[in-house]
Image (cartoon, rainbow, N blue to C red):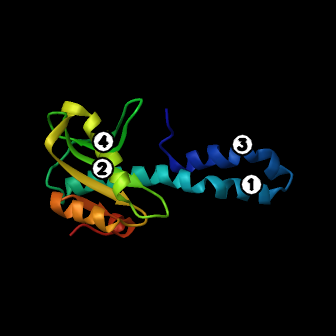
Amino acid sequence: YQMSDDFFRFWFRFIEPSQGHIEFGDAERVVDGIMSGLSEHVGSAFEGACRDWVRMASAAGILRERVGRVGSWWNPDHEVDVVGLDDHGRAAICGECKWQAQPFDWNELEQYLAHVQAMGALVRPDVAHVLFSKSGFTDRVRIWAESRAARLIDPADLLAPFS
């Protein structure tokens, strides 16, 4: 199970376990704990925002395929952050989300594509790829995306209005 409310996730990850330190005025220790885990915490919220973007872009007709459900897919060895299902329950849109300091690179793209391949027959042959990255994309990934008509989305694109 996972909490869907980011405020509660933050509270129960950082504040509630630190109640003793807060009560005794050890704010520095609490802040250090928050700062050490904040990037990972934000990464999870970023994935949710990316899935929301796919839902809204699909409804707005921005993506080539409209999807009825958007979530994630995983098994013990693979995980796909964004999966949009068509009316027949097949993956029409797949995506990867990276909240990290470095650009999304070729090795990460290969790992993502292996995860998508692990989904097997669930994935349509014409699946659309949408990659999300806090820090942009390497040139090699950009070239791949252009050749596949894949979308590359950074935080500015994530927040921009659809046009």
Secondary element at image label 4: helix
- Mark 1 crowd level (few <14, some 14–19, many ≥20, 10 Å Cα): some
- Determine the CA span between mark 1 and mark 2: 34 Å
State the residue at coordinates (30%, 41%): 114
Q: Please say if 8 is above or below 34.
A: above
Give percent across and percent down for residue 12. 63, 43
Q: Mark 1 or 2 closer to N-term?
A: 1
Give percent across and percent down for residue 26. 83, 56
- Give the residue type at disc 4: Ala
Q: Which residue is mark 3?
A: 17
The disc at residue 114 is: 4
Q: Which residue is mark 2?
A: 95
- Determine the CA span between mark 4 and mark 2: 12 Å
Res 71 → quadrant? top left
Secondary element at image label 1: helix
- Determine the CA span between mark 1 and mark 3: 10 Å
- Tell me if residue 27 can be seen: yes
State the residue at coordinates (32%, 52%): 109
- Give the residue type at disc 2: Gly
- Give the residue type at disc 3: Pro
Which label lies toward us, 4 or 2? 4
- Determine the CA span between mark 3 and mark 2: 33 Å
Q: Which residue is mark 1?
A: 30
Q: Mark 1 or 3 closer to N-term?
A: 3
Residue 10 horizontal side relative to residue 103, left or right: right
Q: Please say if 58 is above or below 125.
A: below
State the residue at coordinates (43%, 63%): 134
Question: Do the residues bearing badges 4 and 2 touch, measured as CB atoms within 8 Å?
Answer: no
- Mark 2 crowd level (few <14, some 14–19, many ≥20, 10 Å Cα): many
- Determine the CA span between mark 4 and mark 3: 37 Å
Res 30 → quadrant? bottom right
Residue 18 horizontal side relative to residue 134, left or right: right
